[in-house]
Amino acid sequence: MKFSHGLTIDYSEMMDIVEALCTNDPLIQFSIFNTNDQLTSEDKWIVDIPDINSSEPVIKGETIFTINYWRISEEPVFSPLYDSPTWKDIINACNNLLQEGDHQGIYLEGLKVHKDTAVRVVEFVIGS
């Protein structure tokens, strides 16, 4: 899935926002967003991200998220059903599923739609 650019901020500022959005201990890290090469310096990692504070839906309709990554579980794990999830929902769904693993694979690298039917199944692509 591709996302529209909404904010250009320091990675640590983005993680402050993520921490505020998480309903439990934040494990999630991001490698899904692009680095802004023109603004990044030796001491700052600047990223171009969507507006993760927005209450607008990112995915329209009923959605279930899953992770199929050996560091989390031998079998895929699934989130509860979300109706038109926002970035807050996506961040929390991923973070909650990451809680089940060994905390080595915590980088969200992408979202992959498996079933574009009445209920979408969207996989969190995770790396370490």
Image (cartoon, grey):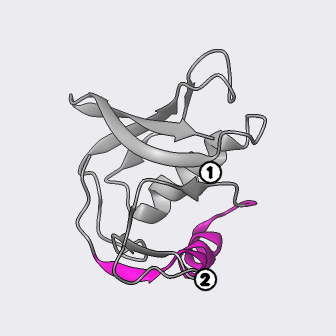
- Residue 116 percent across, percent down from the top left: 21, 30
Tag 1: amino acid: Asn
Find the residue positioned furthest to the front. Answer: 42
Which amino acid, mark 2? Answer: Asp
Counting from the top left corner in percent of width and height, residue 53 is at 43, 77
Left or right, 50 with respect to 9, comes to: left
Residue 112 located within the stretch drawn in magenta: no
Q: Is residue 15 on the magenta stretch?
A: yes
Q: Which residues are magenta?
A: 6-25
- Residue sitting at 70 percent across and 55 percent down? 27
Residue position for label 2: 43
Q: CA distance from mark 1 to mark 2?
A: 27 Å
Q: Quadrant of residue 105?
A: top right
- Residue on which the image places disc 1: 95
Q: Which mark is first along the chain, 2 or 1?
A: 2
Residue ID at (62%, 51%): 95
For disc 1, the neighbor class at 10 Å (few under 14, some 14 to 19, many from 20) is many
